[in-house]
């Protein structure tokens, strides 16, 4: 059957939340709501939005939730939790679940930010639009939207909020106990540099507290000097320039960042070293990938030339890598590489003999990627 529309999902979402006590986490809600539509088939649930970030069904439920928030029936302030307002609970109990969504809620889309689906990571179109929107003080909403697209491309869940008394964008890193959230104030200005007088530090801190977010951030083309950096540090609010975001996107296209690495952007206050810290984390992962590749080559060499030998201790592998020119390698790095390869089944441990590999280096790398993709799924 065709997937239910947002209009069909809204009353079910409302009544489902009421049956769960008025609040539930998104991951708890999806299977319950899906079960309320028995005609949905597994093949329907497998279809994903164009950018691949989630299924069309999950995204459509999220849009229905957005409609309920706009109608004042859901409270969006608690991160990761969908909960009814008093009006929402009253509407659900009364069976009054039919309403017209607010006019500013977008028409049904398969992706809350459909433009992102057509923009590859680091694509010039997004970079150009980011720079242009930052200088367009007449249409500040466009800058908010493009900033959200940038962070979506970096792997965050990003929601444009806006409006009086609200933050512009809310970012969420959905990492369970390692997760975090950020309120973002997007400042467009035709003057090219955001002045301190344009930033309401108390208001931004208030948005962070109201959203129970760990971090707050201001994004602008550039920032004036003076007391602005010191004030940012005083309020614990990070400053990100368009140039920094552009550099992040370009680097992310070549070597993706982990969301845990991107946390450094928001922990460093106004320090310009935050970008270096993020890139450094990605480079360490890139180095680990290189060490894994070299370890696999060692195993392949011994498989072919010394089939009677099973390589064992990381110290032995590190010594062999040193003889091959990796003069800066340390045993702990090799030990972590071996742990990853054993955990994913690329290396097999033999009691009292050490390890053997299960395939040639190219196939082993493919097996490793497939295993890690399976873990993420």
Image: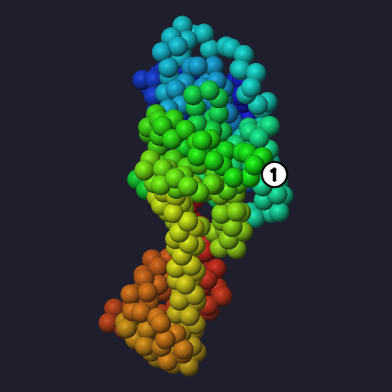
Residue 110 lies, with reference to residue 369, above or below; the image says above
- Quarter of the image with the N terminus is top right
Label 1 Cα crowd, 10 Å radius (few <14 / some 14-19 / many 20+): some
Q: Is residue 188 left or right of residue 129?
A: left
Q: Nearer the viewer, residue 300 or 314?
A: 314
- Colouring convention used in this rendered image of the protein: rainbow
Q: Is residue 2 left or right of residue 303?
A: right
Q: Nearer the viewer, residue 242 or 47?
A: 242
- Observer able to see residue 36: no
Q: Position of residue 338 (x, y in %)?
A: 38, 73
- Count all numbered tags in the image, as a single digit: 1
Q: Position of residue 221 (x, y in %)?
A: 60, 46
Residue 238 lies, with reference to residue 276, above or below; the image says above
Residue 187 lies, with reference to residue 321, above or below; the image says above
Choose top left, top right, bottom left or bottom right for residue 284: bottom left
Furthest residue toward left: 352
Choose top left, top right, bottom left or bottom right for residue 346: bottom left
Choose top left, top right, bottom left or bottom right for residue 186: top right
- The structure residue drawn at horizontal position 38% and vertical position 40%, both measured from the top left corner, is 235
Q: Position of residue 239 (x, y in %)?
A: 49, 47
Q: Give the structural element (helix, strand or loop) at label 1.
A: helix
Residue 35 lies, with reference to residue 303, above or below; the image says above
- Observer able to see residue 270: yes
Furthest residue toward top: 94
- The structure residue drawn at horizontal position 68% and vertical position 26%, both measured from the top left corner, is 107
Q: Nearer the viewer, residue 303 or 339?
A: 339
Furthest residue toward front: 226
- The structure residue drawn at horizontal position 42% and vertical position 92%, both measured from the top left corner, is 323
Residue hosting label 1: 132
- The structure residue drawn at horizontal position 29% and vertical position 78%, both measured from the top left corner, is 351
């Amino acid at each position: 059957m065709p997937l239910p529309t947002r209009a069909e999902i809204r009353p079910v979402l409302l009544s489902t939340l009421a049956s769960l006590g008025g609040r539930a986490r998104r991951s708890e809600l999806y299977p319950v709501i899906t079960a309320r539509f028995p005609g949905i088939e597994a093949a329907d649930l497998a279809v994903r939005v164009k950018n691949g970030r989630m299924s069309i069904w999950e995204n459509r439920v999220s849009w229905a939730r957005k409609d309920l928030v706009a109608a004042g029936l859901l409270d969006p302030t608690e991160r990761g939790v969908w909960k009814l307002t008093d009006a929402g609970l009253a509407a659900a109990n009364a069976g009054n679940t039919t309403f017209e969504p607010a006019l500013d809620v977008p028409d049904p889309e398969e992706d809350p930010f459909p433009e992102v689906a057509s923009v590859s990571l680091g694509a010039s179109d997004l970079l150009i639009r980011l720079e242009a929107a930052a200088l367009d003080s007449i249409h500040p909403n466009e800058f908010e939207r493009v900033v959200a697209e940038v962070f979506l491309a970096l792997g965050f869940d990003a929601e444009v909020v806006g409006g009086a008394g609200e933050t512009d964008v809310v970012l969420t890193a959905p990492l369970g106990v390692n997760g975090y959230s950020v309120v973002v104030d997007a400042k467009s200005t035709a003057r090219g540099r955001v002045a301190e007088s344009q930033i309401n530090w108390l208001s931004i801190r208030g948005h962070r507290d109201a959203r129970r977010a760990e971090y707050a951030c201001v994004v602008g083309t550039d920032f004036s000097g003076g007391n602005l950096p010191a004030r940012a540090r005083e309020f614990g609010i990070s400053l990100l320039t368009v140039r920094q975001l552009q550099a992040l996107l370009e680097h992310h296209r070549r070597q993706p960042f982990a969301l845990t690495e991107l946390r450094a952007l928001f922990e460093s206050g106004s320090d310009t070293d935050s970008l270096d810290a993020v890139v450094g984390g990605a480079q360490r992962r890139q180095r680990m990938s290189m060490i894994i590749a070299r370890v696999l080559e060692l195993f392949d060499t011994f498989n072919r030339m010394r089939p009677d030998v099973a390589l064992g201790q990381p110290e032995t592998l590190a010594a062999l890598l040193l003889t091959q020119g990796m003069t800066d390698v340390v045993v702990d790095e090799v030990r972590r590489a071996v742990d990853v390869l054993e955990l994913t089944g690329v290396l097999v441990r033999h009691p009292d003999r050490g390890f053997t590999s299960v395939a040639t280096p190219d196939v082993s790398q493919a097996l490793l990627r497939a295993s890690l993709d399976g873990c993420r799924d």
